[in-house]
Image: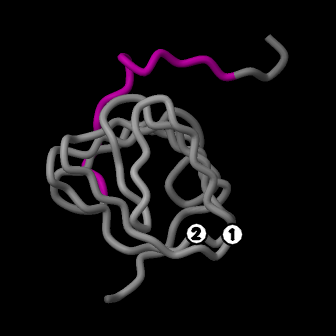
Amino acid sequence: MAGEIGVHYRDVDWEPGRGPGIRRKMLRGDRDNEYTSLLKLDEDTTFPKHRHPAGEELVVLEGRIRIEGQWYEAGCYVYTPPEAVHDVYTDAGATLLLRMPAPAVMVDG
């Protein structure tokens, strides 16, 4: 290997996320810098409003989510541009693969 990082997601524990019904598995990096993670949202869960200083990329692996009125189901790729603000809602529950160039910043209201 030439600097690659390999990890099996089953070997990583779920950690509490930013609110009830939200869990995260950090696959690479850490919460204070660039990272890649799995995010699990339970049924009828909202990830609170937040801003993406450097953008975000995600793939819906299971379930479905709603961002700004648009539904994304399993298999969808979603790119969020830098400085975008949104919340994320799921009615049925969802598992997402996230790539964050910088951590999201929570927004009041």
Residue extending farthest to the bottom is 109
Q: Name the kind of residue labelled 1 in the image.
A: Pro
Residue extending farthest to the top is 1
Q: Which residues are magenta?
A: 5-17
Q: Is residue 21 left or right of residue 25?
A: left
Q: Is residue 95 left or right of residue 85?
A: left
Q: Quadrant of the N terminus?
A: top right
- First in sequence: mark 2 vs mark 1: 2
Q: Would you say the magenta stretch is mainly helix, strand or loop? A: loop
Residue 19 locus on image (x, y percent)? 23, 62
Which residue does the image show at 74% across and 21% down from the upper left? 4
- The residue at which mark 1 appears reads as 82
Q: Is residue 76 left or right of residue 96?
A: right
Tag of residue 52:
2
Between the C-alphas of marks 2 and 1, the distance is: 6 Å
Q: Is residue 3 left or right of residue 49?
A: right
Determine crowd level at label 2: few under 14, some 14-19, many 20+ residues with C-alpha closer than 10 A. Answer: many
Instruction: Please state which of residues 76 and 16 is positioned toward the viewer in this rendering.
Output: 76
- Colouring of the image: one colour
Q: Name the kind of residue labelled 2 in the image.
A: His
| Residue 24 in which image quadrant | top left
Q: Is residue 43 magenta?
A: no
Q: Measured along the vertical axis of the image, is residue 97 above or below residue 83?
A: above
Give the structural element (helix, strand or loop) at label 2: strand
Are the residues at dot 2 and dot 1 in contact (C-beta closer than 8 Å)? yes
Residue extending farthest to the right is 2
